[in-house]
Image: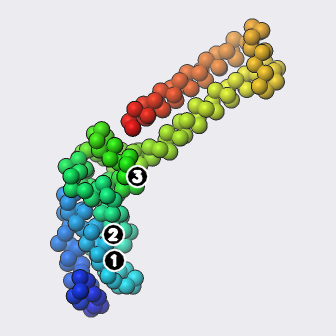
Amino acid sequence: MGTVTKFRGNKRTIKELRELIYDTLGKEVEHIIETGKLLIEINDSTDHGEWEEIFKDNKPFSVQTALKRMAIARHPVLSNPAHGRALPSSWRTLYELSQIPEKLLSKFIEKGKIHSELKRSEAERLKNYDEEKEVLRQLIKGGAYQVMEAALADCGGNPGDFSILEKGDVPQELMDLVDKAGDAWNSLRNQLHSLMKEE
């Protein structure tokens, strides 16, 4: 507890640094940002061993929590006071949002996708937005081709040769399978269109 470190030009004990952190804690977005900024300052002015000592026994919280709070404060959109009212007041939810690129996060705020009641699970979905879009693209792209290739193989055709489907001797159960796959493909396409509208 007696370790002394410099912070803002003054020597402080670990206990004093913890008290400074405790003083900034609060549930409002501005308190979360203020705590993150304070942690950045303390981290920048302490040695590695001293930094870890501050959070010994998870007081005021763990090092991992401190790093997450710092990530929130470093995000230019989240730390912009103009967005404070549009943001959720949970640091865990804000941390998920801090993983979203600045430009996309700004769009989400502008369109009302991010709001003060946003849940952590919703933030995680927004965080994975680009990945979800790409997965749907790949499914749509590969799905139709795979269905047609399977249909050709079941009908005795050669891969890439769709002329067999024009002969009219395709079994009904195969056509039903193709119809089901087509419905699934359309559903994926509609999901992708819906995601694209979010941008």
Identified by mark 1, the residue type is Asn
Determine whether 129 is above or below 89 in the image.
above
Q: Would residue 158 appear left or right of 185 to someone viewing this image?
A: right
- Front position among marks 1 and 3: 3
From the image, which quarter does the C terminus lie in? top left
Closer to the N terminus: mark 1 or mark 2?
Answer: 1
Q: Would residue 35 appear left or right of 138 to someone viewing this image?
A: left
Q: What is the basis of the colouring in this image?
A: rainbow
Determine whether 14 is above or below 189 in the image.
below
Q: Which numbered marker is on residue 43?
A: 1
Circles 1 and 2: CB atoms closer than 8 Å: yes
Badge 3 marks a residue whose secondary structure is loop
State the separation of the CA atoms marked 1 and 3. 24 Å
State the separation of the CA atoms marked 1 and 2. 10 Å
- Front position among marks 2 and 3: 3
Q: Would residue 176 appear left or right of 137 to someone viewing this image?
A: right
Which quadrant holds residue 61? bottom left
Closer to the N terminus: mark 1 or mark 3?
Answer: 1
User: What residue is at 46 percent from the left and 29 percent from the top?
Assistant: 193
Q: Which numbered marker is on residue 101?
A: 3
Q: Which numbered marker is on residue 195?
A: none
User: What residue is at 43 percent from the left and 35 percent from the top?
Assistant: 195
